[in-house]
Image (cartoon, coloured by chain):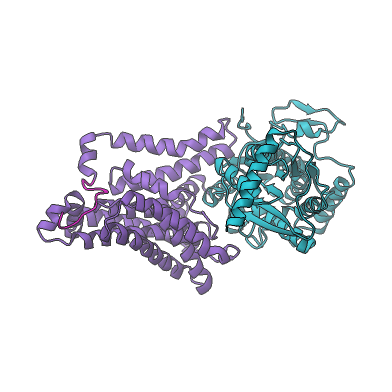
Chain colours: A cyan, B purple
Amino acid sequence: MPRMNRRIALATIAAGALATAVALPAAAQTKAGEPLKIGFVYVSPIGDAGWTFQHDTGRKEMEAALGAKVTTKYIESVPEGADAERVIRELAQSGHQLVFTTSFGYMNPTIKVAATFPKTHFEHATGYKSAKNVGIYNARFYEGRYLAGIVAGRMTKTNVAGYVAAFPIPEVVMGINAFARGMRSVNPKAEVKVVWVNSWFDPGKERQAADTLISQGADVVTHHTDSTAAVQAAEAKKVYAVGYHSDMSKYGPNAQLTAVTHQWGDFYTKAAQSAVEGKWKPGNVWGGIKEGMIKLAAFNKVVPQDVQDQTRKVEADIRAGRFHPFTGPVKDNTGKERIAAGKTIDDVTLNKMDYYVEGVQGKLPSSK
Amino acid sequence: MDTFAQLVILTLAAGTPLVFAALGELVTEKSGVLNLGVEGMMLVGAVVAFMVAATSGSPWLGILAGMGAGAATSLIFGAITLSLLANQVATGLALSLFGIGLSAFVGLDFVSVVIAGITPLSIGGLSDLPVVGQLVFGHNPLVYLSFALFALVQWFLYRSRGGLVLRAVGESPQSAHAIGYPVIAIRYAAVLFGGACAGLAGAYLSVAYTPLWVEGMVAGRGWIALALVVFATWKPWRVLAGAYLFGGVTLAQFQVQALGVAIPSQYLSMLPYLATIVVLAMISRDAVAIRLNAPASLGRPFHPAA
């Protein structure tokens, strides 16, 4: 396809020239009538549940909403690091004008590639670096975690919950803390045991970690890893579980009390729509229950009505902005006060959370 | 339930896939063939076992199919390295990559399927005995199968005529050929056995241990099995010890974490690898013994005319 090659060559030359010239304001490249090409980079296989599955669901919702105005392409299982940069570069080079990079580890590659493709729009999930053509978006997972904690706190009999966690980064830590605070808000005796598996995706290890937690008395298990193994472990051992990322009730029909799910569809649709109209601007979106980015999956029938009502009420309070899971007094698990009574944590501090709150056992493995 | 018994059960369950895969690879390597494709064969075994278990409704049929699929995958390796005399290292690596991709492709429609896996034994009366009941009768049936496999491999290699011939082929294929043994055929058999064992290991993961199929679910266990064979200096009982040590330390570090001990989890995550390497290096630090145990022709192609 000589024509295609020439086009790529021209684009590369143009990009190179632009990088040295004064950065021009980003403008949509679409000619009238031609669909906007949108690329997605996924960190794991799509599968049937989990982080990437939710992003892909969002992509499909966007396609359904915008129809012929967009075409999308996704690349699965892209390791974070040098490979990511190559994949992102290829997407930009082959004329994708909007590229969503959906994992924290894509942050630096995205910023790097974005600098050489100033006319391409990038949206990076869960990172903190932005640029003239790089927007960032994330979901307030912790809001859902707090609600799930309420359910867990009411349903536990041993007062111990088990938490299978991937890596000790703030995103995961704030989820653990919110869960513990949710549990404790209804059950002051509740404790959360955490096991770090140091992997986002290893069903065998996730299963082992969940089994371990259950053997140490946890009767509600939740996880911040990508597979359904923890929920399945709970199902096999006849204890409860809270799913994460996706509704996992299929894997634990008796075990899953509810699940904290991510909904990216609205955000993707809006971002793509504004790119189609040439109005795209780099934003910093951090949406939660209010924006519909976080939803609880349907309650299991074993969850009593009053527990459901109580959870829904707090959910409504969060939606209305009347309640924040990290409103003081918040003490860490050594007893030190972290947030004063009546104060609410701000987003910057929240994003640096590096301690366990009261009710979480053990010491947080420091990432510094 | 008794924590100790529980820990033993979990350790054996975690070590079992490594036992299957490493014992199979050990037999392959004893014949002088180095097949680095264990990870790929395990994944193919896992996906086929899961697919068959899901469509037929019988997890045991799935296990059998997984073994068959592992063997079939290893046959590709055998044909390329034994008949076409290609480089074993390169072919094995290619087989791993091929298996990863093939299993992902073939299993695409099965990622959302839920199956009833093979669950641990529960023998009325026996499994309920205090302490011993669970320890002796509470394992997954496949764990007992791994014990049987170990006994079989140990017996075959060191107590049977066939094993002697296999080892002779691995030490000096020229001599074995000169006294009339079909070197290539024996190596094919060893490769197929290794493939079936790797397939069984994968099948155990997808049908018994974590009954689900997702791309890449073997998560590097094939490579650990390969390393185990070397660190165990090609001795079956050391493979067994290494596999359980690895599984046990993995679990122990989770236990320690769940108890809330203040050791950074990153160090604890290193521990299984570190402990296994250190212990196996210690018990097999005798250089002479290593040389005696390592198949002398490992990784070298054989041609009768050469």
Per the image, is B301 magenta?
Answer: yes
Q: Which residue extends farthest top?
A: A336
Q: Is residue B3 above or below residue B152?
A: above
Q: Is residue B63 above or below residue B173?
A: below
Please report the residue visible at 34 percent of the width from the left and 38 percent of the height from the top: B280
Per the image, is B3 magenta?
Answer: no
Q: Which residues are magenta?
A: B295-306
Q: Nearer the viewer, residue A157 or A28?
A: A28
Q: Position of residue A42 (x, y in %)?
A: 63, 50
The answer, for residue A208, to whether it is visible in the render is yes
Quadrant of the rendered image containing residue A160? top right
Q: Position of residue A84 (x, y in %)?
A: 59, 44
Q: Is residue B169 above or below residue B60?
A: above
Q: Is residue B303 left or right of residue B258?
A: left
Please report the residue visible at 67 percent of the width from the left and 41 percent of the height from the top: A15
Give the quarter of the figure containing the N terminus of chain A.
bottom right
Please report the residue visible at 51 percent of the width from the left and 68 percent of the height from the top: B51
Q: Position of residue A117 (x, y in %)?
A: 68, 42
Q: Which residue extends farthest left?
A: B179
Q: Position of residue B204 (x, y in %)?
A: 45, 59
Q: Is residue B306 left or right of residue B73?
A: left
Q: Is residue A210 left or right of residue B164?
A: right
Q: Nearer the viewer, residue A325 or B179?
A: B179
Overall secondary structure of the magenta stretch?
Answer: loop
Give the quarter of the figure containing the C terminus of chain A.
top right
> In this figure, what is the number of numbered marks?
0
Q: Is residue B288 left or right of residue B19?
A: left
